[in-house]
Image (cartoon, rainbow, N blue to C red):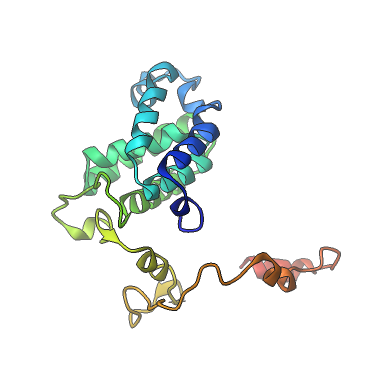
């Protein structure tokens, strides 16, 4: 979002999402399944696409970025809208239950992986859809009573610098080291410092042979 959408006008981002998703085939609006629950959740093309356009017009840049990411992952902007709608109507454990039901519905009628993995995608969308980078927009989960039920940045206004900083943490054995601050000091951070030419030295030789054992080690 920082590298792309934040530098664009809102209408231009809307147009990109419109061209990439709303002008293309959306399987959620034409799913061949016998369950009436699917239509009640995802609707049909004629009635849902105007709703999606109106929704995008009210989204912040960060929310549109989250919608784009989940849209790319599931080949559907409608999927992002359904998740956002759940977030506006449920919180905490109840929202998690709704995520589980939606993931189960998707698993039963498509091939997008395991239910557990799909729920993780939903939770990631929940986090980033709720972050506001000094923008005005609908605050999701603004009245959650227990802050332990969601990420503390959800529904809060933060700066781009803070958002970048909070993504750079040191982990040990899969656990984030506790002595690190909530957000690192990146006052000297310059996202435009590196250009494509500087990365040339990092490219590997495509003709170079790698032992299978070494490759597997890299995967680990």
Check the picture and name the quadrant holding the C terminus: bottom right
Q: Residue 165: x percent and y percent?
A: 40, 71
Q: Is residue 202 left or right of residue 29?
A: right
* Residue 136 higher or lower than 40, as above or below: below
Looking at the rendering, which quadrant does residue 161 occupy? Answer: bottom left
The front one of 87 and 1 is 1
Q: Which of the two residues, 215 or 8, is positioned nearer the viewer here?
A: 8
Kindly identify the residue that appears in the image at 37 percent across and 46 percent down.
Answer: 63
The x and y percentages for residue 87 are: 27, 42
Q: Is residue 19 left or right of residue 136?
A: right
Please, which residue is most extreme toward the bottom here? 179
Residue 8 seen by the camera:
yes
Residue at horizontal 38%, vertical 50%?
A: 62
Q: Which residue is drawn at 35% across and 46% down?
A: 60
Q: Is residue 71 left or right of residue 38?
A: right
Instruction: Spot the residue most to the front.
Output: 9
How many discs appear? 0
Indicate the position of residue 205 as horizontal and vertical percent values. 81, 68
- The picture quadrant where one finds residue 215 is bottom right
Compared across the picture, whether 30 is left or right of 99 comes to right
Residue 151 visible? The answer is no
Asked where in the image residue 58 lies, by quadrant, the reply is: top left
Q: Give the image location of residue 118, x and y in percent.
A: 44, 44
């Amino acid at each position: 979002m920082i590298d792309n959408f934040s530098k664009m006008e809102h209408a231009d981002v809307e147009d990109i999402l419109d061209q990439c998703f709303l002008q293309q085939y959306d399987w959620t609006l034409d799913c061949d399944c016998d369950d009436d629950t699917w239509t009640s959740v995802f609707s049909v093309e004629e009635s849902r696409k105007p709703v999606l356009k109106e929704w995008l017009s009210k989204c912040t840049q960060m929310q549109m970025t989250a919608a784009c990411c989940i849209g790319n992952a599931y080949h559907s902007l409608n999927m992002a809208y359904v998740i956002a709608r759940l977030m506006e109507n449920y919180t905490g454990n109840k929202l998690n239950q709704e995520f589980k039901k939606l993931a189960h519905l998707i698993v039963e009628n498509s091939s997008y992986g395991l239910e557990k993995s799909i729920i993780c995608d939903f939770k990631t969308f929940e986090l980033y859809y709720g972050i506001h980078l000094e923008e005005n927009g609908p605050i999701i989960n603004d009245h959650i009573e227990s802050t332990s039920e969601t990420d503390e940045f959800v529904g809060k206004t933060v700066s781009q610098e803070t958002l970048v900083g909070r993504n750079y943490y040191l982990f040990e054995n899969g656990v984030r080291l506790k002595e690190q601050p909530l957000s690192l000091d990146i006052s000297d951070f310059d996202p435009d410092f590196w250009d494509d030419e500087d990365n040339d030295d990092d490219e590997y030789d495509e003709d170079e042979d790698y032992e299978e054992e070494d490759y597997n080690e890299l995967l680990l």
